[in-house]
Amino acid sequence: MEVTYIGHACFLIKFSTGLSVCFDPYATGSVPGLADADVTADEVFCSHSHADHNDKESVRTPEIPYNGPAPEVEIIQTFHDDVCGSKRGMNNITIVRSGGETAVHMGDIGCNLTQEQADKIRGCDLLMIPVGGFFTIDCRKAFEICGQIGPKVVVPMHYSGESFGYDVISGREEFVELIRSSGEREIINGGSVVPALPDGKVLLLMEPLRIL
């Protein structure tokens, strides 16, 4: 599985089957410090309708489309806040399985998982999870959820950096420190593109590809 972190909550995942999937493409100008997402993918999934997650129309179709086995896709509906959606509405967790590989994109989750929801995600190969708080769960809650579901590789997303992201959300530093203190995961800096997932339980730190 190849992982490219476009930025914010947008990823391009290429499964070993050849299937390419884009999660949460953001609209031009919707995320401070990031250039156009500029993604080509066979499938596109958006967690909710906000502009920084829902520019499905901008994602181009590959010149040679995927013709392998259809992926298995499961959507888990959650809340975009901790008050049953009354502030920001609903959010979709998207599970994509292809060729024995499972990628899970948590979208802008803002609430706890039920046990039933956690069971559906448990042990996934790749978990993309927001950590920045305010609009989503924060670093500490993300750490708790990771402990609940035990993914193999975790990539934090939806955080602010020195030159990108929203002022009201935090960086990923507390999340990294919580993982480091737990001693349960190796921490790897992966840049913007990771050709294959590392083995074992790993916190994979990626940098946005589209920083201005």
Image: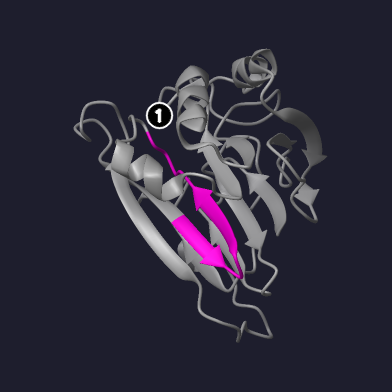
**Amino acid under label 1?**
Phe
Nearer to the camera, 38 or 97: 97
Q: Look at 70% across and 23% down and name the residue there.
A: 162
Q: Look at 56% across and 54% down and name the residue there.
A: 103
Residue stretch in magenta: 95-109
Q: Is residue 93 above or below residue 173?
A: below
Q: Is residue 97 left or right of residue 80?
A: right
Residue 183 point in image, percent of width and height: 69, 19
Quarter-of-image position of residue 205 = top right
Label 1 environment density (alpha carbons within 10 Å; few <14, some 14–19, many ≥20): some
Nearer to the camera, 197 or 212: 197
Q: Is residue 194 visible?
A: yes
Q: Quadrant of the N terminus?
A: bottom right
Residue under circle 1?
Answer: 135
Kindly report the secondary structure that dominates the magenta region of the rendered protein. strand
Q: Look at 60% across and 48% down and name the residue there.
A: 126
